[in-house]
Amino acid sequence: MEKRTVLDRIEMHSDGTIRVRLLKQIADCSGEVVFSEPHRLLLTPLSDPGEQKRALDEHLGRMGFPALGSPDWQSVLDETAAWTPDVVAAWEARRDAS
């Protein structure tokens, strides 16, 4: 049996949040997936992606799954380029208003 963490989906939302869906999978010796469960991560324009990655990997590890691989994480980081100063300012204004 092999446990793996698979990047399934990255969604950028109009409010600037990045929603990431991973799949925690277990495959048998032939590679057939016998278990698959989603695991979600939310990044906001004010979050520290490096800290989010550390927390994610620690959480996955506690559940017995491997960390998300660097190429997949880079795909998530690429989305943060949309966090322009205007997007961050709008996010801060919404946060401060609530």
Image: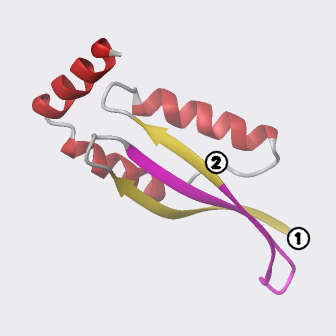
Q: Is residue 33 magenta?
A: yes
Estimate the x, y position of residue 72 in percent, counting from the top left: 47, 58
Q: Amino acid at mark 1?
A: Met
Residue at 42% from the left image edge and 37% from the top image edge: 43
* Vertical placement of residue 89 versus 34, above or below: above
Circle 1 residue: 1
Could you tell whether 1 is left or right of 90 in the image? right
Estimate the x, y position of residue 53 in percent, counting from the top left: 52, 37
**In the structure shown, which secondary structural element does the residue marked by tag 1 occupy?**
loop
CB contact under 8 Å: marks 1 and 2: no
Disc 1 residue crowd, few under 14, some 14–19, many 20+, Cα 10 Å:
few
**Which quadrant holds the N terminus?**
bottom right
Could you tell whether 6 is left or right of 98 in the image? right
Estimate the x, y position of residue 79 in percent, counting from the top left: 29, 50
Circle 2 residue: 67
Magenta span: predominant SS is strand
Q: Amino acid at mark 2?
A: Ala
Residue 55: which disc? Answer: none
Image color mode: secondary structure
Q: Quadrant of residue 16?
A: top left
Residue at 64% from the left image edge and 48% from the top image edge: 67
Disc 2 residue crowd, few under 14, some 14–19, many 20+, Cα 10 Å:
some
**In the structure shown, which secondary structural element does the residue marked by tag 2 occupy?**
loop
The region drawn magenta spans 18-38
